Image (cartoon, rainbow, N blue to C red):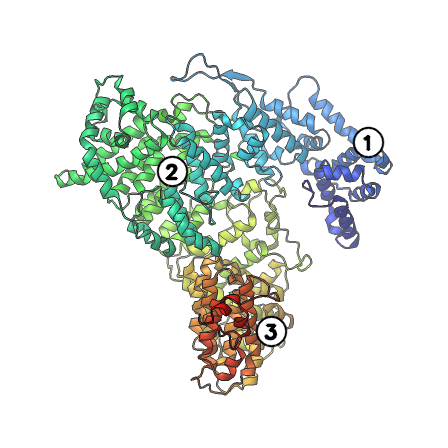
Amino acid sequence: MKSGCIDFVDFIDKLGSRLSASDHHILNTNHVTWLLAQIIRVEHVMTALNTDSRKVETTRKILSFHREDRSSDPNNPQSILLDFISSCQNLRIWSLNTSTREYLNNEQLQKGKQIDEWWRQVSKGERMMDYMSMDDKSIGMFWVVSYTMAQPACETVMNWLSSGGVTELLPGANVQPNERFMVMREVSPLPISLLSGFSMNLYLKLVFQMEESLFAGQVVPSIAMVETYTRLLLIAPHSLFRSHFSHLAQRNASLLSKPAVTLLVLEIVNYRLLPLYRYQGKCKPLMYDVTKIISALKGKRGDHRVFRLAENLCINLILSLRDFFSVKREGKGPTEFTETLNRITIITLAITIKTRGIADADHLLYLQTMLEQILATSQHTWSEKTLRFFPSILRDLLMTRTDKRGLAIQEWLQSETTVINQCTQLLSSSAEPNYVMTYINHSFPQHRQYLCAGAWILMQGHPENINSGNLARVLREFSPEDVTSNIYTMVDVLLHHIHIELQHGHSLQDLLLKTCANLAFFVWTHELIPLDILLLALIDRDDDPHALRIVISLLDRQELQQRVKLYCMNRGPPEHWLYTGIFKRSDLQKALGNHLSWKERYPTFFDDIVARLLPVIPLVVYRLIENDAIESADRILGMYSLFLAYHPLRFTFVRDILAYFYGHLPGKLIVRILNVLDLSKIPFSESFPQHISSSNPAICPPLEYFATLLLALVNNVIPPLNSNSRTGSMGDASNNSVRGPHNKTPATPQSGPANASEGQKAFYQIQDPGTYTQLVLETAVIEILSLPISASQIVSSLVQIVVNIQPTLIQSSNGLHGASSGAVQGSVLPTSPSGGSTDSAGRSTPSVSGINTSSFVSRSGYTCQQLSCLFIQACGLLLAQLPPEFHLQLYMEASRIIKESWWLTDGKRSLSELDSAVSYALLDPTWASQDNTSTAIGNIVALLHSFFSNLPQEWLEGTHVIIQQLRPVTSVAMLRIAFRIMGPLLPRLVTAHNLFNKILSLLLNTLVDVFGKNTQPPVPVEASEITDLIDYLHHIIHYEGQAGPVQANSKPRPEVLSICGRAAESLRPDVQHLLSHLKPDVNSSIYAATHPKIAQNPSS
């Protein structure tokens, strides 16, 4: 409405006509008036009510939507708001236009005096409104005030947040004492239960005022103000979302030049709004914005705090991306990423391609270019154990990369004498203080990367041997990328040193203990280097047998355990938006350590060196699993499970790690991974816990379990057939922005229509994955991936349900609830080969016994015919989310069922009977449901179409397997089935030429199977039987040539004509004739003769 996409007057006309026609249930409450009151201050709306020629008519219609909405609980805040909302609306219209005042409701105008009186009572004198002790009635009335007096309401909120006054921040040890720093004292942030009912107008005013205070004020804001600001953005994710860097630049170009503003924005986004950016699809633009900061700072001496925070945010952003992305906004040249980010990007690509696939054919073409951009500035190679889990397309490109670690060690050995000499002068206890600046200004750049390695050698297991003060000062004066280079080099040197010492007969255990003591000196005792980068450097050397043992030892150390415990205690609950207490600001040095806090004066809000580990711990777990260190992965997850609750995208982490390592995770570790989640808030199936903890994992869960999963998808994910198709009101599962009841926990999928209200959960309640629709779908995926049975068993169960779904539901409606034998039929079921009973519930497939289908129909709100179609859609959608291991099983199972269909293999059937049967079999199940007929083949084909339509482009590469399994095709009936399976897929592939050619060739080969020159069919078949298939081939080839709908001047691609020409050479003459124009021969093909490229070069 705000951007003018909707004409307000036209909208009111259509709403009025719809309400007067049939949809009276919309006006059961006053929500329509509430909706209109939200937008009444939008410029287009005010124009319509003030100057439009139809303003009187529009006003009268708006007023007619009012309903008296008396609740049984008059003190409920929502009831109070709905009771007064018409009064708010009338008051606003009254102030807009004098000519429409006569149509206003005087009773509602008089009611407005109650609002004024309540406000005078609570705001009189200098008494501050205490937002933390408001009762329900006061909350409701304040909501009402937000519609009538938004500016005064805004001022009282801002007064509350600043009511603690200000205090002077004591300067740190390295800050000049004359630098004064004023900070707001802490109060409680406004509770989300209060904020959630404010008018949109008040939201906009508050956000504007808070941004002024946060980013342009002279006083450091309180955590309460920052937290309240982020809560507003989470409550209204669509209306209030802004890309902060571009938004602030537009507001005041000089703001982001202030380091304090940049720090605050980075903290807000990294620790509060990351899921919101992902929900809005704005992670990529944000990544580019943050990369600019990183690029500007990575070579700048001393700017470590902003750089490391920006780098950590970029790590989180890259790991949050689950679709393909360019590493540079402009797309050309080497990446501006740091070495760390380059490595993280490769890992993210591997996870994305393996667990989600590549959606677009163009992305496949760009992949090699992208890798070249990344590797142009990265020296890293990945271990064989890591590469074996990479998707093949990525593994093949990376396997040829030369490992330069041997060369790096050789360079170290050449420089070692010089480096140790310099480090001795710099780091001895009697070192000259002036030598620090001499080293910083005059040492060779190639030697600086060895500073930490030299210090580590000098320690000899006794960190107290070196001058930590000088080392700290030099590292702080280095650029951030110099420090990163030092860490990566030190890791290589210390691992090499361990191997040398082992050859000299030293004990491995003693060496590892000394190594960890030295590293603890670097990280904890003197806080010289960032722990997150050290851990990433170590896990990237997992091909060394000692690297991961060092990582585990570091994560086991008490120093880290205590810091993590302190962080969790001070940080408050993971669901920060529900916290009503006063936030405690951590001391800058304690939060960030000496290296990052040196010379810094701006206090932290949410940042902490422990929080920087949130994206790192999951990567450690990945690397441990890759190296078969299952027990260690289990222990690390158990040790850090409470900490991982703060991970902003932990649900995504669980889903993806189960998919990435599918088939390689033992049941115990799967359970441990699942316990990373808050299981009480995930809509798992009721029987799921018993299936994953079964003492006999070989037993497949009953079909009812899988049918229940599909029913949850039908109820919460698959769009409704139409607004009146369901017997119950199911709600809109995708509309997660509508505010729902507070503190309501999700129901399990078994609860049927009651789940509708869960679809109305606010975004802040399910930030990962973002909508209840996505949550239900991804939960089903997690369940499937966690089951201790094979992909083959899972696919077989799902396909069995789909093949039999309609006959089973119809039998249920006739009182045969889940009959155990297909021979038992209701009288409505046909008995011919085309009928659902004889085919799909009869000999060819097992029965779907044990499913309480009558319960399923009642819980869905659909008829059994509608539900059968939706089950097929849901099953295809679910299978398309699963890793490719499941796809192959689906193709094998589908081809088996088709080939074993008894009426296709029965040699006694006449051609006319088979033709009739195929015609019925290939009917869309939606049509078949109208006369209660469905077939195994019809349902399987529909399942494959649903599956194909949800697959990313890359995963379509495997679709040819099903046709290969059906070959050799020996009848026109089977030929039609092959074309029906693959036909709808081809239009999707018009830009993926290689895959299009592959599938087209496969279909032409099936044609040769039946109509080949040397083929002897059991029964002679005329070429005229397949003219419709020939027509289809002509059409799709032109469609692909045009890259879209066929036009009068569409031309097939020469490459495609060559494919058709080669296939035609193997066909019978009468069929060849039908394909004569689909050849590259200019003498016989009008397409070739008129094609510019072929006509100019006929020999080609």
Alpha carbon distance from label 3 to label 1? 63 Å
Q: From the viewer's side, name the closer residue of 814 and 1014.
A: 1014
The residue indicated by pointer 3 is 933
Secondary structure type for disc 1 = helix
Q: From the viewer's side, name the closer residue of 140 and 897.
A: 897
Q: Considering only order in the chain, which callout, 1 or 3, is on the residue closer to the N terminus?
A: 1
- Estimate the x, y position of residue 156 in percent, counting from the top left: 65, 24
Q: Residues within 10 Å of mark 2 (few under 14, many from 20)?
A: many
Q: Quadrant of the C terminus?
A: bottom left
Alpha carbon distance from label 2 to label 1? 65 Å
Nearest to viewer (mark 2 / mark 1)? 2
Q: From the viewer's side, name the closer residue of 944 and 513.
A: 944
Q: Residues within 10 Å of mark 3 (few under 14, many from 20)?
A: many
Q: Considering only order in the chain, which callout, 1 or 2, is on the residue closer to the N terminus?
A: 1
As shown in the figure, which amino acid type bears the numbered disc 2? Thr
- Estimate the x, y position of residue 725 in percent, counting from the top left: 67, 60
Q: Is residue 15 left or right of residue 1066?
A: right
Q: Quadrant of the N terminus?
A: top right
Q: Considering only order in the chain, which callout, 3 or 2, is on the residue closer to the N terminus?
A: 2
At 36% across and 24% down in the image, what residue appears? 594
Q: Is residue 154 left or right of residue 845?
A: right
The residue indicated by pointer 1 is 110
Secondary structure type for disc 3 = loop
The residue indicated by pointer 2 is 338
**Which residue reaches farthest front?**
1096
Alpha carbon distance from label 2 to label 3? 61 Å
Question: What count of labels does the image hold?
Answer: 3
As shown in the figure, which amino acid type bears the numbered disc 1? Gln
